[in-house]
């Protein structure tokens, strides 16, 4: 079984979106500064982090609000999305209370209505030996880390203070992680933490 | 004039203390996990970060609550404090509304009652060619960065989620910083950001 990685970009002050995220502005106002590392395409470290992450990913997990944005007018397409332009586009498991009645994107997505744990299990089965990427939103990543449903937390820390928006971490029990790898680029600090399993493994 | 650096240790979720900080527990409950990098003394990078920081510091700025802890029963001594055991112990400028009536530590501290800007100016004058370290608490560091009274923000990001406590950043206007240097140790990720002056410099 591959490793399960929560992977998300965060501001210095802990936000994964700016204020006012909606279907057309998934990152809120000013939130695009978060993802400069992924789009600037002028830094070898950023390119390696991006390529290595997507190359090992066999399935993706996301929350319903993230899907609604991905399915929205500024969402995924042939050129935007997870591993755009790559021959393999991993299946995506969406944690949701109810399956959407209609949607723009009709392939690649499976809706899981019995919780995050079930979605990660389904993704894990689909991924086989490859990794599962839990890509957001904040609620899904936070729960996955706090419930130790992931083995790794990879944060891409962008050099920006957003001031407000959607906080990644907001409460919860104290939890020690193990800092496993740090890579700095011109646009971000990429840190991988190991999350101990609930059985101590 | 030396550079003015806000320098503070923070959890992954953005806290500089755990819950319930008080005069006897300046870091709150569980907050000591933050400073493992500074005390473990088993990592060359941590040692270099610590030595280089203190070696260039000519004066320190802190807030009143930080002083009250530093002056308290578990506070500074011959062996604990800023640059303990070093021949030069930098003067400390405390931002406060009122000068304390009595205190345990009688040397090294100057109380500044006309604001953070004035405290940083006084520290800067005292430091000469050396750096000024703005070391906390959260309010003082946050204001110093937001008001661009510092040229650098150095964060020591400890691999722990505290869940609650004193947040370093909590609101304020959006602000882009420039990621200048990243150093990883076994216990923390040390990131230095450049803060643009308010005149754009």
Image (cartoon, coloured by chain):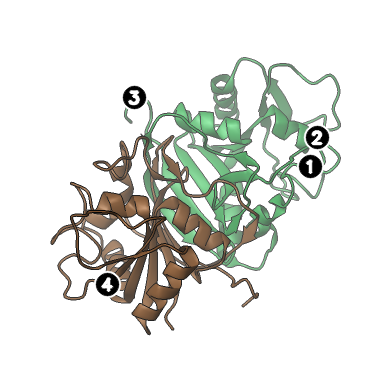
Chain colours: A green, B brown
**Chain of the residue under the numbered disc 2 shown in the image:** A
How crowded is the residue under tag 2: few (<14 C-alpha within 10 Å), some, or many (20+)? some
Report if residue B192 is visible in the image. no
Q: CA distance from mark 1 to mark 4?
A: 55 Å
Q: Horizontally, is A88 left or right of B90 in the view?
A: right
Chain ID at mark 3? A
Residue name at image x 18 percent, y 55 percent: B104
Residue drawn 68% across the image and 56% down it: A33
Image quadrant holding the C terminus of chain B, namely: bottom right
Mark 1 or mark 3, earlier in chain = 1
Q: Position of residue B87 (x, y in %)?
A: 16, 75
Along the line of sight, which residue is nearer the eye, A39 or B26? B26
* Whole-number angstrom distance, CA of label 1 to CA of label 3: 37 Å
Residue A45 lies, in percent from the top left, at: 55, 63
Residue A199: image tag? 3
Q: CA distance from mark 3 to mark 4?
A: 47 Å
- Note whether residue B161 is visible: yes
* B94, A128: nearer the viewer: B94
Q: Quadrant of residue A158?
A: bottom right
> What separation in Å lies between label 2 and label 1 (alpha carbons)?
7 Å
Which element carries disc 1, helix, strand or loop?
loop
Marker disc for residue A76: 1
Q: Which chain does the residue under circle 1 lie in?
A: A
Q: Residue at x 41, y 77 (%)?
A: B124
- Residue tagged 4: B90
Q: Secondary structure at mark 2?
A: loop
Q: Looking at the picture, how far across and down is residue A61, in whole percent?
A: 62, 32
- Residue A119: % across, % down: 60, 23
Image-based side of A187 in relation to A149, left or right? right
Instruction: Give the distance between the C-alpha atoms of the residues marked 3 and 2, in whole angstroms.
Output: 37 Å
Circle 4 — which element?
A: loop
């Amino acid at each position: 079984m591959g490793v399960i990685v929560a992977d998300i970009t965060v501001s210095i002050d802990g936000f994964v979106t700016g204020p006012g995220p909606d279907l057309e502005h998934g990152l809120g106002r000013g939130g695009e500064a978060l993802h400069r590392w992924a789009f600037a395409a002028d830094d070898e470290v950023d390119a390696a982090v991006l390529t290595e992450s997507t190359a090992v990913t066999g399935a993706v997990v996301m929350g319903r609000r993230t899907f609604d944005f991905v399915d929205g007018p500024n969402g995924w397409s042939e050129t935007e999305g997870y591993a755009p332009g790559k021959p393999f586009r991993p299946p995506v498991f969406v944690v949701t209370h109810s399956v959407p009645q209609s949607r723009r994107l009709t392939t690649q997505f499976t809706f899981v209505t019995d919780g995050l744990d079930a979605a990660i299990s389904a993704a894990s089965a689909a991924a086989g030996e490859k990794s599962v990427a839990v890509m957001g939103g904040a609620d899904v990543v936070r729960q996955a880390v706090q419930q130790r449903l992931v083995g790794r937390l990879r944060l891409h820390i962008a050099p920006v203070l957003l001031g407000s928006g959607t906080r990644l971490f907001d409460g919860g029990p104290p939890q020690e992680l193990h800092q496993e790898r740090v890579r700095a680029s011109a646009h971000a600090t990429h840190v991988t933490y190991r999350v101990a399993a609930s059985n101590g493994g």
